[in-house]
Image (tube, coloured by chain):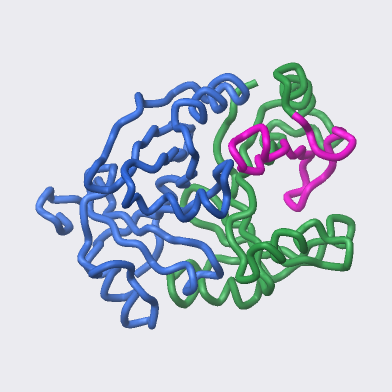
Chain colours: A blue, B green
Amino acid sequence: MKLGRLNHVGVATPDVAEAARVYAELYGAADATAPKDFPQLGVRVVFVTLPNMQIELIEPLGEASPIHKFLEKNPKGGQHHMCFEVPDILAARDAMRARGATVLGSGEPYIGAHGVPVIFVHPKDSGGVLIELMQDPALYDGAGGHA
Amino acid sequence: MKLGRLNHVGVATPDVAEAARVYAELYGAADATAPKDFPQLGVRVVFVTLPNMQIELIEPLGEASPIHKFLEKNPKGGQHHMCFEVPDILAARDAMRARGATVLGSGEPYIGAHGVPVIFVHPKDSGGVLIELMQDPALYDGAGGHA
């Protein structure tokens, strides 16, 4: 298991539309999607595309959203996670466990906002940084595993 | 002014050597520099190189280090800033001010750990995210401005 490219930095915010406006108007980063709701993930998301990666703006959606706790601690928002591509998400999950790290939830990869399977590694394993691992979309067979 | 590529994500940590060990052993991200001290910046730094960007691991150096406050709030460490390349750092600084943002310190670009001029934009202007803007190294004339 070896990290591939950084796919995105996840940035939590109380308002994705306002955050997208800031990236567009202050920083000229105007290549952004419309806000999209993912009720099953508890988030509303805007992707801002930059030359070599994306910023994933994340707003809590619903009372059970995993983003509420972060915004309680950081009311204005902030950097929430880094997401790296891996060639085989199941092999990556197994490697995380074999190397002593804690995979969040059941440990079964699930489809994230990018439409490919992901897992999250507990921040305690990586110096306080929440790390998302994402099946490399170019190597995804569409059935939950790698091509 | 328009953001270019993400150069790095800055990750604060109480111990860059230990953090580098985690990225190498847990994540297979072993392409890393030796720790280097920048007394004038108040930081000890390790760069971990990934396919499309770097992680800048940052440990406080000296009592006046700007990283102490972050680690008081986040003792294990965490994501500290995102750094984007811009074609002309002085034009970027002027654009930030013209657009109503607060450039930290005197506002004069100074040489950062990558050897090119940088500025930082106050987190209040970007939804709690500290943004570093870096003179694109490929367009740097070595004298404080762009080529």
* Residue A77 percent across, percent down from the top left: 55, 43
Q: Quadrant of the N terminus of chain A?
A: bottom left
Residue occupying the far front of the picture: A63
Q: Is residue A63 left or right of residue B99?
A: left
Query: In the image, is residue A52 above or below residue B80?
Result: above
Q: Nearer the viewer, residue A123 or B29?
A: A123
Q: Residue furthest top?
A: B98
Q: Give me the residue at 55% from left, 58% from top.
A: B49
Indicate the position of residue B59 as horizontal and vertical percent values: 72, 67
Q: Position of residue A121 (x, y in %)?
A: 39, 67
Tell me: A76 left or right of B71.
Answer: left
Q: Is residue B139 left or right of residue A125?
A: right
Q: Residue at x 38, y 58 (%)?
A: A132
- Residue A42 on the magenta span: no
Note whether residue B137 is visible: no
Residue A5 visible from this viewpoint? yes
**Stretch in magenta:** B102-131
Q: Residue at x 25, y 62 (%)?
A: A89
Q: Nearer the viewer, residue A140 or A41?
A: A41
Horizontally, is B143 left or right of A128 in the view? Answer: right
The quarter holding residue B117 reads top right
Q: Indicate the position of residue A101 as horizontal and vertical percent values.
A: 39, 77
Residue at 31% x, 43% y is A62
Total numbered labels? 0
Q: Quadrant of the C terminus of chain A?
A: bottom left
Asked if B49 appears above or below A16 in the picture, the reply is below
Q: Residue furthest left?
A: A143
In the rendered image of this protein, does residue B22 appear above or below residue A53?
below
Q: Is B118 a magenta residue?
A: yes
Front-most of residues B85 and B19: B19
